[in-house]
Each structure stands twice: as structure tokens, then as C-alpha cells.
Amino acid sequence: MKNLIAVFTLLFAMVSLVQAQDKKPPMSPKITAESPDRSITVVYGQPSKKGRVIFGAEGSNSLEKYGKVWRTGANNATEVTFKNDVMFGGKMVKAGTYTLFTIPGEKEWSVILNGTLGQWGAYDYEKTKGTDVAMVKVPVSMNKTPIEKLTITPSNNSITIAWDNMTVSVPVMKHNS
């Protein structure tokens, strides 16, 4: 009987320890950012630079390669919600929630809105790219000082993505129908 009590006590202690470890904050916290008028909401995992080279050519030691689809965040793919129909970089997009992908480049990025929600990373993008609703190319601005944490900022008229030494911004305007 004493052995049985000891086993249950040990088992309870192990389960408690595992549960306590599960409560650590994620390495890339989930961020919700809203435009000032709350017409645009972006939900994304926020990775940190941590001394890494973030963007670079194929064959480099960069985290994200030029010309490759990126989930534009960490963990689950980033989602953007528009409360109204908008012109996203000059392309008409209906009100709703979309997955945000980018294809970083040295001088310009392609920014993609995809209609398939609930994706993990960009691993299945090739299977879901048929549900893209918009793809726009935007120029890169180089940051004077590297930005440590990925920051996606929706304003009333744009969505700006900034990390490491690069910033891109997509114009967003409410569509008057």
C-alpha cells in the first residue's frame, strides 16, 4: 500500500511539473494589432531577431530567403481582418479575414492575402495559393537601426511590416461601393 501511495504521489508531482512547464509564455508571443478606427485587425506571432540575420539570398545563413513564401510571423500564419471592403495596394478585397503571406526581396516584397484560414506557417501555401485574393508588390525601405521584434502595424490607410533592417507598407483604403 505504501508503494502504491508513493507511485501516485510521484505521478501527481510529474503531472504538476509538466503542466507548470506548459504555462511558459511562447517564445514568439501572439500579438493582436488594430488600426486606430478598428477597421483592420492583424493577429500574428511576433518573433525576435536574437542576433540572427533575418533576410537574405538563398544559400545565406538568413532565417528567411529572398523569393520564398513566408508566413510573415511565427507559429500560425498571420491573419488580417478587414471590417469593410478595401482597396489593398490597389486591389479590391471584400470585408473578411485572410491569411497574410509575403515573399521578401532585396528591393521589393510581394504581399499576399489568401482565403484559406487556420494555416500553420507557409508549409501548405503551394496547395492553397489558388485561394489568393490579392498579391501586391511594394518597395522596401531600409531601416537605419535594426528592429528586434517583427512588428505589423495596421493604420487607417496602410499595413506596415517591419523587422530587422527592412520595412514595407501596403496602402489600404476603404472601398466606396
Image (cartoon, grey):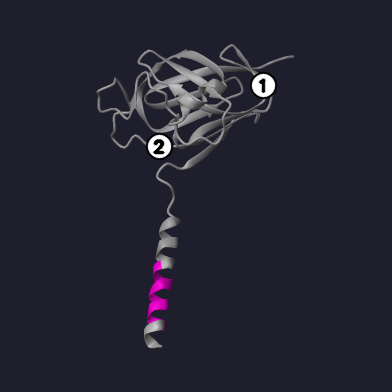
Is 86 drawn above or below residue 24 in the view shown?
above
Horizontal relation, residue 142 to residue 32: left or right: left
**At x 37% / y 37%, what residue is drawn?**
48
Q: Residue furthest front?
A: 127
* Dominant secondary structure of the residues highlighted in magenta in the image: helix
| Residue wearing tag 2 | 47
Percent position of residue 20, x then y: 43, 61
**Disc 2 and disc 1 in contact, CB within 8 angstroms:** no
Given residues 40 and 124, the one toward you in this image is 124
**At x 50% / y 23%, what residue is drawn?**
160
User: Magenta segment range?
Assistant: 5-14
Q: Residue type at mark 1: give it.
A: Lys
| Residue wearing tag 1 | 94
What's the mark number on residue 171?
A: none
Is 24 drawn above or below residue 41 in the view shown?
below
Q: Is residue 8 magenta?
A: yes
Given residues 143 and 75, the one toward you in this image is 75
